[in-house]
């Protein structure tokens, strides 16, 4: 009861802070200088006239991406082909700017200043449908700005005699430290983090030892720097990647990372699902094994773009259709369930409703690990269990954009705890496909015998998953040798 009251007090304080922040934001909003502007999603008819061929996938996918498919017995198919360059030229000939594309869903994003352009585009034989996904607002708030950061952790944050420091409870609750004990810390694994920004990751000393392979911004217009945007992605990354003994060790400190920005902080519109898809496809193309996404959508600035709960079937929303394809590419997607449990919506959002992914809810930080009141619930509209699993997120210990170890609430932070340990597990069980590994995690979680739509399959036990996975691998090997 004490923990619950503390949580509710924290949530109330956070809500008060958010209200104060919103008041401050309203004072510093500036007129949107490029308006009026519209972004449409064009769905194309096919991929004819393509300069690429399935016979030569190395022209559009990295060796690592192709090898990931080969290892799992997956083939490159037509959804992997880039959008037809001939069709792109046809669209651009109508005096519109193509600002993005999805090869998986065969779509283009176009930016126009007058809706009359849509009539010209609709006349093209290669365009099957067009949908408005973004409209310029009257005003916006600047998002990219510099903040000060600490050169080192506070001495009081050190935990004497405890290697994991402040992150101890969130990894041991999932028995993840036992994977680390046998040398499974994410080596050889590549993880993409799709988020809204990674404030000061390029400067905070605790992140200097993280193997960051690169970063990319998919939002239009591009930010001056993904490292000056929100620190939400900083905190998400820290849960996996930071490794400062006796202060903080994340769940996959030896993995390598791509930092991908898809979240537009200035507006909330459906185009973010296109940006998210572009980021996921980029992660695929460079060869990432896992993707962590602590983003979710259900309500947009334009009510016509918002979702109804009956649409949570994993295949209605653009982002969920993309998410549901990722296991077919050999990628494990770990996504946050959402924080709507105490609101009127209550349910998961998109892409948390997708098929063939791990959706993660949040539990309280102390045993007996009750569900966090804010954690979104299932099921999906087609009655699949959601969330899949739960992990500590009320609160989670994280490193923020000021380089300070702190508490924060949300399924945004329970998801990367699970993602990092999933990478460590897959490091040991490379013979398993993405779907097989996710099912192994579900089967060895605490609530597998009686899954529900609050805890899902329960709290993962990554050591048990490792032991079961190794045993099954040895059994398969013994049978093949007979």
Image: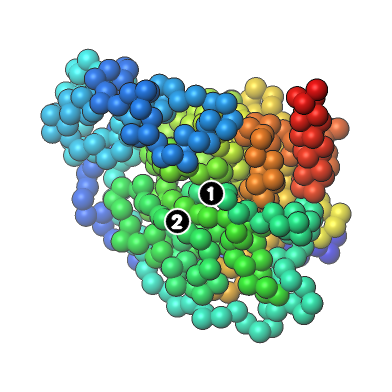
Tell me the crowding category of disc 1: few under 14, some 14 to 19, or many 20 or more residues within 10 angstroms, Cα based: many
Which one is earlier in the sequence, the residue at label 1 or at label 2? Answer: 1
- Give percent across and percent down for residue 87: 22, 24
Q: Quadrant of the C terminus?
A: top right
Do residues under tags 1 and 2 come within 8 Å of each other at their CB atoms? yes
Image vertical order of residue 119 relative to residue 336, above or below:
above
Label 2 element class = strand
- Give percent across and percent down for residue 36: 22, 44
- Give percent across and percent down for residue 426: 66, 43
Color theme of the render: rainbow
Q: Could you say which is closer to the camera, residue 332 or residue 129?
A: 332
Image vertical order of residue 358 relative to residue 143, above or below:
above
Tell me which residue sits at (53%, 55%) in the image. Answer: 256
The residue lying furthest to the bottom in this view is 155
Image vertical order of residue 159 relative to residue 233, above or below:
below
- Give percent across and percent down for residue 374: 68, 50
The quarter of the picture where residue 102 lies is top left
Left or right: residue 251 versus residue 160 is: left
Q: Could you say which is closer to the camera, residue 347 or residue 155?
A: 155
C-alpha separation, residue under disc 1 versus residue under disc 2: 9 Å
Tell me which residue sits at (42%, 47%) in the image. Answer: 262
Residue 402 visible in the displayed image: no
Which residue is disc 1 drawn over?
190
Label 1 element class = strand
The quarter of the picture where residue 140 lies is bottom left
Q: Quadrant of the N terminus?
A: bottom right
The residue lying furthest to the front in this view is 482
Tell me which residue sits at (65%, 22%) in the image. Answer: 382
Which residue is disc 2 drawn over?
213
Tell me which residue sits at (56%, 44%) in the image. Answer: 290
Residue 163 visible in the displayed image: yes
């Amino acid at each position: 009861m004490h923990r619950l009251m503390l949580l509710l007090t924290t949530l109330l304080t956070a809500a008060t802070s958010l209200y104060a922040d919103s008041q401050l934001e309203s004072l510093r909003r500036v007129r949107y200088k490029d308006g009026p502007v519209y972004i449409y999603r064009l769905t194309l008819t096919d991929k004819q006239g393509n300069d690429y061929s399935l016979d030569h996938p190395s022209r559009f996918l990295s060796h690592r991406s192709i090898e990931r498919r080969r290892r799992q017995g997956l083939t490159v198919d037509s959804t992997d082909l880039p959008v037809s360059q001939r069709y792109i030229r046809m669209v651009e000939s109508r005096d519109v700017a193509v600002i993005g594309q999805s090869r998986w869903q065969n779509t283009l994003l176009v930016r126009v200043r007058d809706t009359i352009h849509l009539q010209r585009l609709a006349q093209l034989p290669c365009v099957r449908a067009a949908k408005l996904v973004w409209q310029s607002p009257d005003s916006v708030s600047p998002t990219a700005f510099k903040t000060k950061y600490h050169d080192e952790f506070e001495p009081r944050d050190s935990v004497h005699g405890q290697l994991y420091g402040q992150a101890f409870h969130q990894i041991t609750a999932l028995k993840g430290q036992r994977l680390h004990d046998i040398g499974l810390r994410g080596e050889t694994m590549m993880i993409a983090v799709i988020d809204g920004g990674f404030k000061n990751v390029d400067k905070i000393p605790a992140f200097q030892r993280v193997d960051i392979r690169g970063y990319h911004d998919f939002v239009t217009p591009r930010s001056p720097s993904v490292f000056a945007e929100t620190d939400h992605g900083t905190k998400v990354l820290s849960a996996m990647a930071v490794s400062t003994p006796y202060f903080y060790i994340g769940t996959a400190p030896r993995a390598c990372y791509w930092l991908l920005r898809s979240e537009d902080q200035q507006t909330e519109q459906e185009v973010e699902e296109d940006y998210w898809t572009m980021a996921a496809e980029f992660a695929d193309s460079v060869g990432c094994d896992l993707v962590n996404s602590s983003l979710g959508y259900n309500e947009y600035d334009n009510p016509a773009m918002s979702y109804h709960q009956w649409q949570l079937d994993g295949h209605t929303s653009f982002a969920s259709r993309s998410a549901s394809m990722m296991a077919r590419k050999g990628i494990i997607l770990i996504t946050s369930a959402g924080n709507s449990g105490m609101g009127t919506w209550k349910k998961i959002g998109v892409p948390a409703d997708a098929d063939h992914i791990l959706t993660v809810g949040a539990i309280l930080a102390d045993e007996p690990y009750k569900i966090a009141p804010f954690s979104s619930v299932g099921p999906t509209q087609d009655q699949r269990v959601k969330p899949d699993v739960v992990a500590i997120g009320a609160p989670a210990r994280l490193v923020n954009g000021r380089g300070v170890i702190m508490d924060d609430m949300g399924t945004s932070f329970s998801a990367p705890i699970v993602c990092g340990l999933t990478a460590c597990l897959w490091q040991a069980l490379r013979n398993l496909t993405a779907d097989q590994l996710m099912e192994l995690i579900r089967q060895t979680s605490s609530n597998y015998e009686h899954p529900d739509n609050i805890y899902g399959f329960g709290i993962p036990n990554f050591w048990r998953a490792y032991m079961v996975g190794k045993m099954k691998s040895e059994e398969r090997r013994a049978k093949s040798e007979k």
